[in-house]
Amino acid sequence: MHTEFSAELITVQAAADRLAVSRWMVYRLIWDGRVRSVQIGRCRRIVRQSFDDYLSGLIEGAA
C-alpha cells in the first residue's frame, strides 16, 4: 500500500490496541455505525478520520 494512503486506513487490531479493548469491541463500534470501515477483499479496515473523530468524542465526553 502506498504510504500516503496507508495513514487513511487502520486495521481493526490497531484500533483495538489504541483503545485498549478487544477486536470484538471494535467490530461492535463498526456494526453500531460509530466508526466507518471498508472491506478490501477479506480484510476490514477502519477509516482513520472516522476513528479519530470517535476518539475525540470520547475524550470530550470525559472532560
Image (cartoon, grey):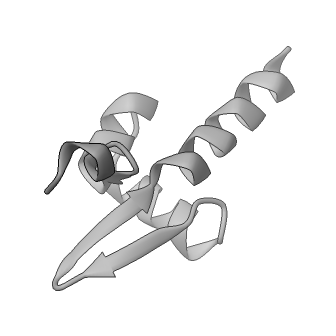
Q: What percent of the width, then of the height, locates residue 1? A: 13, 57
How many numbered circles are shown? 0
Q: Nearer the viewer, residue 43 or 2?
A: 2
Horizontal arrangement in the rendering, residue 5 relative to residue 42 (left or right):
right
Residue at coordinates 65% horizontally, 71% vertically from top-left? Answer: 33
Residue at coordinates 84% horizontally, 28% vertically from top-left? Answer: 61
Q: Nearer the viewer, residue 17 or 3?
A: 3
Q: Residue furthest top?
A: 63
Q: What percent of the width, then of the height, locates residue 8? A: 40, 50
The image quarter in which residue 26 lies: bottom left
Horizontal arrangement in the rendering, residue 38 relative to residue 43 (left or right):
right
Residue at coordinates 64% horizontally, 71% vertically from top-left? Answer: 32
Is 60 drawn above or below residue 14 in the view shown?
A: above
Q: Residue furthest bottom?
A: 41
Which quarter of the rendered picture does the C terminus lie within? Answer: top right
Q: What percent of the width, then of the height, locates residue 56? A: 70, 31
Horizontal arrangement in the rendering, residue 21 relative to residue 31 (left or right):
left
The image quarter in which residue 20 lies: top left
Is 47 drawn above or below residue 15 in the view shown?
A: below
Residue at coordinates 40% horizontally, 75% vertically from top-left? Answer: 38
Q: What percent of the width, then of the height, locates residue 57? A: 76, 36
